[in-house]
Image (cartoon, grey):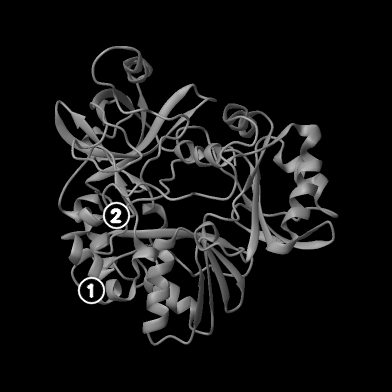
Amino acid sequence: MAEAVEAAGNPVELMRDLGVGKFTKVPDEITNWIEEQRSWRESVAFADQSYHMTDQYVEGPDALEFYSEFAVNNFDNAEPGKAKQLVVANPNGKFIGDAIWFHLDDEKFLSVGGAAAHNWLQYQAETGEYDVTAELQGRPVQTGEDPNNFRFQVQGPEAIKVMEEAVDGDIPELGFFNFGDVEIEGHEVNLLRHGMAGEPGFEFWGPYEHGDEIKEAVMAAGEEYDIHHLGAVSYQTPNAVLGWIPLVVPAIFDEGMEDYLEWLSVGQGLLSIGGSFESDDITDYYFTPTELGYGHIIDFDHDFVGKEALEAEAGDPDREKVTLVWDGDDIVDVFASLFSDGETYKFMELPHPRDAACPYDQVLKDGELVGLSTDKSYIYNHRDFISLAVVDAAYAEPGTEVTVVWGDPEDNTNKRVERHAKKEITATVAPAPYSEDKR
C-alpha cells in the first residue's frame, strides 16, 4: 500500500474515482426492491449475508487482552454467548472500522464485518507479542472462495414466528445481542438475537455446506407469513433507517502508521471515494467513533489505542451523526433534467445510489461547508430519500434545513458516473436512527 500511495502522490489521488466492486453474489433483486423493502416492515424479510463481509477468528490466552488494547469497547462483561459491536480507532482517535464480535468460547472469538478493522487487528496480532492466533478470511465475493459459514438473517414483525416454525424444538430465551445454539433440519446453528431497520429479528450461521438446506427450511417456514428474500440492493438500504454508516475512509494514513501501510496490500485496504466533497488532505475524510454514534460504547476505564484523543472529545464533539431527509421536489428535478435540453444532473439510481465505496457529499448552510453526507437510500416504507451525515454540532438539531450538493467534481474519472451538472438539494435534519427501534 505504501508504494501505491507514493506513486499516486497522496492517498486521495489513489482512492478517488475507483468505482465500486461487486457487493455480493446475491442478485440485485430477487423479486422487486419495493416489495422487498416492504417485507421488513409488513411481514418478514430474509437476507443472505454470506458473501460480502470478512471473518476473523482470534484464539488464545491473550485474546481478551489483545482486543482490550485495540478496541474502544468494555470487555468486563465478556462471556461466551454474548456479542458486541467492535470499534477500533487509530492512535489519534480517528475511526478505522467496526465489526460484530462474538464470544464463542473461553479463549475463542469471531468477528464479522468490513475489512478495515480486521486488517488492523490482523497486523497487530502478527507483529505484536500476544499469545494468540488470528485467521482472517477475505470477502468471499472478492476472493472467489466459499465462505467459512453461511450467514442469514430474518427481520420483520413476523420474524420470530418464522424462526419458531423453522427451528427444531424451542428457541432459547435470548437477550438482544446474545446468541445460542439451535437446530434446523438436524444441523446445529448459532442464533443471534438481532435485527435491522428497527424491526425484530435473528441472525444465524453455521457451516457453509449446510447453507442451502437451512435457507430452504427457513423460506418454507416463512411462506405463510409472506416472506421475501432480499436482493443485494434492498439489503443495503436499511442501514440508512437504522443509523449505521457501513463504510467511511479508514484512518490509516496518519504519521506513525507507515509500518502498517508497508504490511497492508492495496487489495486488502483500498476503498474508493466519490461524491461532491473533495480535498487533497486525506484526514478531511476521517471521522471519530464518537462522530459516528459510537460514543456510548467507548469505555475509558481501560487503556486502548486512541484513548487520549477520544477522552478530549468526550461530551463535547465538534460534529454529530444525523439523518438528512432530502427534498422530494428537488429529487424530482434530478430526474426531470433527463427530459429537457441542456446539462443533466447526476443520475440517481434508486433505491441505493452507490458509485463509490465511500460516498462523501457536501452539506452546506448558507453556502458554507458544515458537514458530510454519506450512505443514502430511498425508503419506500417512509416515502423518503434519506442519507446519514456527520454535521457540525450547531446544525445537528432536528428540523434544521441544510443543502446537500449532489454530483461529483468536474474532473471526475469514475467510469460509472456520466458527465453532469451539480444539483443543490434541500435537506432537513432528523434523528439517527430515523425510525422507532422495535428490536
Can you name the residue that lies furthest to the top here? 340
Q: Classify 10 Å Cα crowding around label 2: few (below 14), some (14-19), many (20 and above).
A: many
Instruction: Give the residue at x 31% y 16%.
Output: 337
- Residue 169 in the image: state x and y as whole percent: 85, 54
Instruction: Give the residue at x 33% y 20%.
Output: 334
Is 119 placed above or below 113 here?
Answer: below
Q: Classify 10 Å Cα crowding around label 1: few (below 14), some (14-19), many (20 and above).
A: some
- Residue 398 in the image: state x and y as whole percent: 33, 29
Instruction: Give the residue at x 31% y 54%.
Output: 249
Left or right, 146 with reference to 282: right
- Residue 87 in the image: state x and y as whole percent: 41, 61
Secondary-structure class at tag 2: loop
Please identify the quadrant where the C terminus is shown.
top right
Q: Amino acid at mark 1?
A: Glu
Secondary-structure class at tag 1: helix
Is 122 placed above or below 239 here?
Answer: below
**Residue with the mark numbered 1:** 258
> Which mark's residue is nearer the viewer, 2 or 1?
1
Q: Amino acid at mark 2?
A: Thr
**Residue with the mark numbered 2:** 288
Instruction: Give the residue at x 36% y 28%.
Output: 347
Is 5 placed above or below 334 here?
Answer: below
Q: Quick one: 233 or 94, which is closer to the camera? A: 233
Q: Quick one: 30 or 102, which is closer to the camera? A: 30
Please identify the quadrant where the N terminus is shown.
bottom left
Left or right, 248 with reference to 7: right
Tags 2 and 1 touching, CB below 8 Å: no
Q: Quick one: 9 or 180, which is closer to the camera? A: 9
Label 2 vs label 1: CA separation? 20 Å
Is residue 296 among what the camera can see? yes
